[in-house]
Image: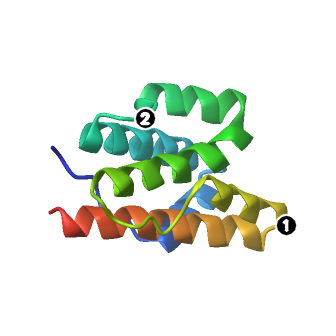
Amino acid sequence: MSVGKVRNPWLVILFSVITLGIYALYWFYASFKEIKDFNDAGVGGGVGLVIAIIFGIIDWFLLPAGIATMYKTQNQEAPVSGLTGLWFLLPIIGGFVWTIKVQNAMNRMWEANA
């Protein structure tokens, strides 16, 4: 069982803005891959990336749902769920909140299992 990379959520946002979304695509790929590598569940990096490119809105719900599943396999209460994607309904600020909540949830799991 490998653990994922701890990332600063503010840097994820900054790099995504600076690269006009290219880093965000990499981040989706890496996040889905890390979750799949950790607990052998979820869509994995390649499928997560394709969904991000073609149907981006689905990843808003799919990534936090995958994180929730990861927490459940560790018998822990998940800090995010598929409903976390609803943050995107708030213009601009919702994307910030969503990214911070999702990345922090992954960071806590990676740090606990390092």
The N terminus, quarter of image: top left
Most foreground residue, 28 or 112: 112
Image coordinates of residue 17 in percent, x first then y, are: 64, 60
Determine whether, in the image, residue 2 is placed left or right of residue 75: left
The C terminus, quarter of image: bottom left
Residue 34: assigned label: none
Determine whether, in the image, residue 49 is placed left or right of residue 73: right
Q: Nearer the viewer, mark 2 or mark 1?
A: 2
Residue 42: assigned label: 2
Image coordinates of residue 42 in percent, x first then y, are: 43, 35
Residue ID at (32%, 44%): 34
Image color mode = rainbow
Q: Amino acid at mark 1?
A: Pro
Total number of numbered labels? 2
Residue 52, placed above or below residue 88: above
Task: Answer yes or no: is residue 14 visible.
Answer: no
Residue ID at (56%, 58%): 81
Determine whether, in the image, residue 18 is placed left or right of residue 73: right
Residue 10, placed above or below residue 67: below
Q: Amino acid at mark 2?
A: Gly
Residue ID at (31%, 50%): 73
Q: Which corner quadrant of the image does residue 99 belong to? A: bottom right
Residue ID at (29%, 57%): 5
Q: Which residue does the numbered mark 1 point to in the structure image?
A: 91
Image coordinates of residue 101 in percent, x first then y, are: 54, 70
Give the secondary structure at mark 2.
loop
Give the secondary structure at mark 1.
loop
Q: Residues within 10 Å of mark 1 (few under 14, many from 20)?
A: few
Image coordinates of residue 77 in percent, x first then y, are: 41, 67
